[in-house]
Image (cartoon, rainbow, N blue to C red):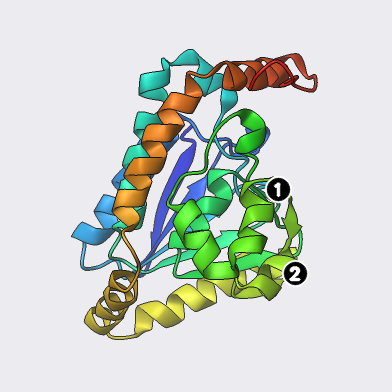
Amino acid sequence: MSHVLTAQAGSVLEVTFNRPEKKNALTATMYAAMVDAFHRADADPGIRVVLIGGAGDSFTSGNDITDFQARSAAEAASPAASFLDALSSLATPLVAAVNGAAIGVGTTMLAHADLVIAARSARFVMPFTSLGLVPEAASSLLFPALIGHQRASALLLLGEPIDAETAHRWGLVNQVVADAELMATARGIAARLAALPAAAVRQTKDLMKNGRPDVAGRIEQEMRLFRDRLRSPEAAEAFQAFVEKRKPDFSGFS
């Protein structure tokens, strides 16, 4: 069974994280499939919108820790880096439908979506520092700009979770709907986008993205630090504690 499903409905390409038994935790294979889907969308004039969502009760619980541990530290960041490059450079409008857990990259990727619809069950958390890591997806640049430094500090430094209503109030999502209405609402918005003049929509997206600071440079800087942190003793302790289902002890690290 594929852990990333793609289906084209008219001019909308729906891409679904399909690993519900693992809360849609992302593996290298899943990252590669997402890259393929984004490249397909940009290459096919018949695709005017990409809609991403998660199967089951979660959007995505972030990176699969076991998958991280199974690969070397140098390789671990590479599939994610390719995904982030494809995501940040995607010319096709991107709509995200978020339900349940949106953890780590499950939240940071949303800064690159053009429209985000959240179910009431959505919960957003970026626990990078508690894993001995740094954030990615240019979130260290985009989130302070989007919601302010203090709020971004609570999310990125402390890893504080927020619910869908808070995310809406802070401007992280466009709309909050009942879980049962999530996909119908997101599909309706995607269809509205797809019905507009495609060139005008893509050019407008490009104009807005070009007004941002150096996203690509920040992604590269974050990933360099991310690779270093993956090799750190703090990350090793955090991952081992996760596997052993215990609280990590960082008291011995400076």
Q: Residues at badges 2 and 1 in contact (C-beta under 8 Å)? A: no
Q: Against 221, is 142 above or below?
A: below
- Left or right: residue 111 compared with residue 254: left
Q: Which residue is mark 1?
A: 57
**Residue 69 in picture, x, y percent from top left:** 52, 16
Q: Secondary structure at mark 2?
A: helix
Residue type, label 2 = Glu
Asked which quadrant contains residue 244, the reply is top right
**Residue 107 in picture, x, y percent from top left:** 57, 52
Camera-side residue of 65 and 186:
65
- Left or right: residue 57 compared with residue 183: right
- Measure the alpha-carbon separation of dots 2 and 1: 18 Å
- Characterize the local packing of mark 1: few (<14), some (14-19) or many (20 or more) Cα atoms within 10 angstroms: some
Residue 80 in view, yes or no = no
Which numbered mark, 2 or 1, is in the foreground of this view? 2
Camera-side residue of 160 and 157:
157
Residue at the far front: name it: 254
Camera-side residue of 10 and 206:
206
- Left or right: residue 54 compared with residue 120: left
Q: Against 239, is 141 above or below?
A: below
User: In the image, which disc is placed on residue 165?
Assistant: 2
